[in-house]
Image (cartoon, rainbow, N blue to C red):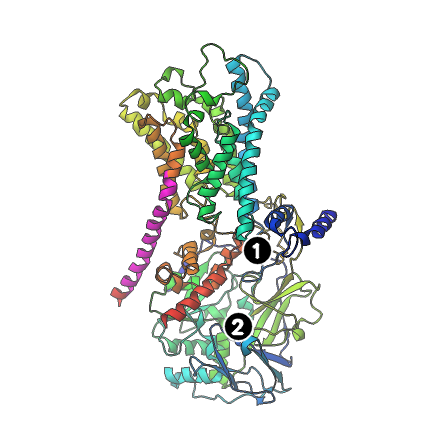
Amino acid sequence: MKAIRKQVDKIKPNFEKGGKLFFLRSTFDAFETFLFVPNHVTKKGAHIRDSIDSKRTMIIVVLALLPAMFFGCWNIGYQHDIATGISGDIFSRFWLGFGKFFPILVVSYAVALGIEFAFAQFRGHEVNEGVLVTGFLIPLVMPPHIPLWMVALATAFAIIFGKEVFGGTGMNIYNPALLARAFVFFSYPTKISGVEPWVYLGDKVPLDGFSAATPLGNAGTGEFDKLASFWDGFIGTIPGSIGETSFVAIMLGAFILLVTGVGSWRIILSVFAGGALMAWIFNLIGANEYMTSVSPIMHLVFGGFAFGAVFMATDPVSASQTNTGKYIYGFLIGAFTILIRVVNPAYPEGMMLAILLMNTFAPLIDYYVVEANIKRRMKRIKLVKTEN
Amino acid sequence: MSVITKIKKGYDIKLQGEAIKKIIDKTDCRNYSIKPGDFKGIRPKLLVKEGDKVKAGTAIFFSKDNEKIQFTSPVSGEVVEILRGEKRVLLEIRIVADERIEYEDFSNKGVESLSREEIISLMLTSGLWPLIRQRPYARIANPDTAPKSVFISAFDSSPLAPDKNFTIEGQSKYFQSGLNVLSKLTSGKVHLNLKEESGTSKVFTEAKNVQINWFKGPHPAGNVGVQIHHLDPVNKGETVWYCYPEDVVIIGKLFSDGIYDPIKIIALTGSEIKDPAYLKVRAGVNLDCILNNNIKNDNIRVIGGNVLTGTKIHKNGFLGFYDNQITVIPEGDYFELFGWMSPGFNKFSFSKTFLNFFNKKNFNLDTNLHGGERPFIISGQYEKVFPFDIYPVFLLKACITQNIDKMEQLGIYEVAPEDFALCEVICTSKINSQDIIEKGIELMIKEMS
């Protein structure tokens, strides 16, 4: 440890003001604080501080994402194998999937970190580690088959227009990772919807009669006989975006987020409650085959519902800030997701749009929650006055 | 009738170096200092010059904004040095004490036969008045207002805080006399707030002329702001005055014996103190005299007060006017390789992101910030340690944006920086909430006067 520290101290002056590498100051700083928790001491206020920092929070989220990532990589291989009739083992499937996933991750991180480093340098603040999570989330919400230049473009759009123009981490209105997905979704719809993008075939030819549609795709086009079973969705052996297919892997992540308190249980719980309730209501109405054929629990395990509820809706910056607001915010995300899936035939998946919509309304929800608090406290004055 | 109020939100930080229950007499220390900086928002006008002889209770300076409020010498002796800082700001008035302390004569007819005006005027001239503070703003009380009630928090819930049941022992005469004074200051109640636990001193439980309230729960249950919020909240235009038991004793002494004698028992605490104990001292005493040879290391921070709200003082500096505790902890100016990635078996954290749940020992914490400053990222964190019906982050943001209307609506009248201390400690983004609130209060005072 001492040796590394010595080395860092040796090169440090180059990056300080007046040094010849000053233009890389924020980059150096990011790497230095990555290696070492800095020696800064408290200057104002409380003299002792909690060991938690933004880096710790973000590494916990990345940790929580790992099960979904590992499963996602395996599933790319698995889907490839059943589409082409190959019987591979678990490792060959994983490596095949990892080979598709890793380049996307590298591109996403390179672009996201590059932009963040540049903005940090330009604005003179430290590099925010939120970008480590965003850069990891983006590949997980992309289809395995996405062209890398699209990932780069989408990431750049999300980081610049989703985050930096608002002032950087903590100031953004929309979840940047979802913005990246939305960018691809609206700019290159054929690459992220329909049948083609979900299964990686490589140079192989698919078997006759193989359909690579996601369960929600099937449901959207009315092919309810082809719908995957609940257990397929639960385990995750269905086509879909890389990280979203396995309910159980996502729940492992949810467990990590909830035990550490990094993810808001209020949001996760209410998203599921909202979704289940809405799907149940549609079941009761039963106006068409979609409403009757897809049960609430199937809605919750198919598509991006669980992934969105656990990793996207809980982004603390773009979600509601108040505890009461979180219930409303989460519930409406769940309800809108099912509403979009069932009622709007143009969008088989509603999670992304529901979260982005509620990101828009989160400040409004908070506004009314805080107003209620203000009114309650104003009332207190009147009560006191009438007593006298 | 007594009420028990349960405080659910909060957190007790368990530190090493609690004072053991013995009192060491340090009233024979010779060097003292009065620091105008202890009194927030006061613009001092000096009344003495170097070389002047003073008695205990002789006025040293007064407040330019309210000339009646005087600040007096804790001892008799000679003014040896007047320290000024940038722009001639008055920093310290240093006094070397006589061997035998002489007192200014404040003899009076006794509390019972004095009117409210006479009591206040005696407190102002004797230098006792600064002991009485007010909410809103946590400043020295404005003697021209009438408070709707007076609060005394008789327990300190902050880390390593002195046990007031211990420090008050044997002072029941002065304490009761002080309570009688306070009850004349308000037409409302005098609230004496105690902690629901065994071993509460009879000095408190048998006090008369007060309303006794019981509190239960973790820090900040002992903060007077929390207690006011739950029992008699401050609305716009209202004032509540407050002070602490050790202040009540000093007030009682003035009205019983006719002297200003700011002797109190403070706790000497912290992991870097060899022999943590209670000390009997006068306000403003030199730390050299009371710390000598009792510190383990060199790289330390001496804090006047507790680790949450105290002020950093030099180890040869002087005790603050309001301090009832000294805490000495290690400085944290070191690098930690991959500290943020480690499992953290022994790391202190309110969050559950470290595997520290097997650690049952008290923590030895230093002053390391444990990370870099960030904007507000995580939500819902402060609410867990902030037992007010107030949205802390929204109030902080109103202070940052200097939005007076919103600050007022969101509860600036009810809070003091100390109420945000725990929020500051547990904050992932390392935001200095206490400083933000202090600046907010300064802005309110400026704009509302």
Percent across and percent down for residue B9 are 46, 53
Which residue is rendered at x = 32% and y = 49% of the image?
A: A368
The disc placed on residue B322 is: 2
Percent across and percent down for residue B367 are 61, 58
Q: Is residue A35 magenta?
A: no
Residue at the disc numbered 1:
A49
Would you identify the image quadrant in which residue B187 lies?
bottom left
Which residue is rendered at x = 50% and y = 32% of the image?
A: A151
Which residue is rendered at x = 56% and y = 24% of the image?
A: A97
The range drawn in magenta is: A357-384
Which element carries disc 2, helix, strand or loop?
loop
Is A197 drawn above or below residue B330 in the view shown? above
Q: Is residue A363 magenta?
A: yes
Q: Amino acid at mark 2?
A: Tyr
Residue extending farthest left:
A386
Which residue is rendered at x = 30% and y = 29% of the image?
A: A281
Q: Is residue A190 visible?
A: yes
Q: Residues within 10 Å of mark 2 (few under 14, many from 20)?
A: some
**A110, B119: nearer the viewer:** A110
**A310, B7: nearer the viewer:** A310
Tell me the chain of label 2: B
Is B375 drawn above or below residue A255 in the view shown? below
Q: Amino acid at mark 1?
A: Arg
Which element carries disc 1, helix, strand or loop?
loop
Q: Is residue B416 visible?
A: no
